[in-house]
Amino acid sequence: MNMLAPKAKVMLVDDHPILRHGMVMLINQNPDMEVIAEAGDREEALSILKAGHHPNIVLMDVSLKNVSGFEVIKSMHSLLPALPVLVVSMYDEVIYAERALRAGARGYVMKLEPGKVLVTAIREVLKGNLYLSNKIQSTLLNRLATGNSESELISRLSPSEFEVLHLIATGHSSRQIASLLSRSIKTIETHRYNIRTKLNLKDAADLIRYATHWITEEY
């Protein structure tokens, strides 16, 4: 008699409980996978892994309270280097997918995609493959072929600085960014200073012009 294959163990890391609940329902509907753990922040996620719960895949949001999801990926990989991570985010993949791969993720899915896309992405990553949409695959190949020097500059930014740059580009003030990311205004201003230094920008106005131009080019 054939034994049923064990279900893939999925861990969710997202600071929105309602969204996590919806993803749990979606994933658990499939006979080949189940959610075995949920976390709302880095500390909770790392505690789960340290306690011996070893999922087959982690679904990670980009933006968590007080920390970038990319930094959490690196922290998890310090514990389990081979742990596959699939980023699931509201942020546009054109802006964030390449950054996710550089942080160690194996794929990127936007939250506005149909549920079947997420399930397909999970299965692909579990097979050992990368998962990106056709659109972003073409974009990344074009960047590789043309050797975009501006992308090299952007790559100097830390995950948190990159996140702040994106929010500046979409018109948010330091106070608004601090509120969105649950960080102090002083921390955001430090990120802004570091961004200007790394990108060789003169002042705050120059930073806003650069950010606006950058995001327009990306889209």
Image: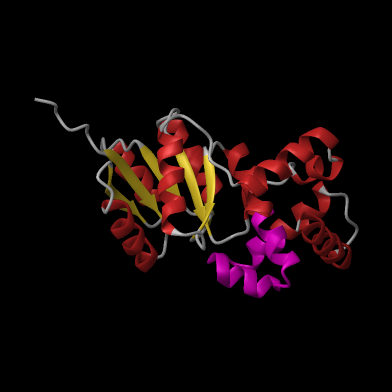
Name the side, left or right, on which 145 lies relative to 129.
Answer: right
Residue under the point 48% across and 54% down = 61
Percent from the top left, x then y, of residue 60? 46, 49
Whether residue 44 is visible: yes
Q: In which quadrant will I find the C terminus?
A: bottom right
Residue under the point 75% across and 52% down = 194
In the foreground, 41 or 121 = 121
Residue under the point 38% across and 39% down = 57
Percent from the top left, x then y, of residue 204? 84, 66
Name the side, left or right, on which 126 lies relative to 144.
Answer: left
Decide: is 154 above or below 128: below
Decide: is 206 above or below 102: below
Percent from the top left, x then y, of residue 174? 69, 70
Name the side, left or right, on which 167 lies relative to 216.
Answer: left
| Residue sitting farthest toward the front | 1
Percent from the top left, x then y, of residue 81? 45, 28
Residue 171 in the magenta stretch? The answer is yes
Whether residue 42 is visible: no
Which contiguous range is marked in magenta? 162-190
Q: In which quadrant will I find the N terminus?
A: top left
Image mark count? 0
Residue under the point 71% across and 42% down = 138
Main secondary structure along the magenta-highlighted residues: helix
| Residue sitting farthest toward the left | 1
Name the side, left or right, on which 89 lies relative to 160.
Answer: left
Q: Quadrant of residue 10?
A: top left
In the foreground, 26 or 82 = 26
Residue 141 in the magenta stretch? The answer is no
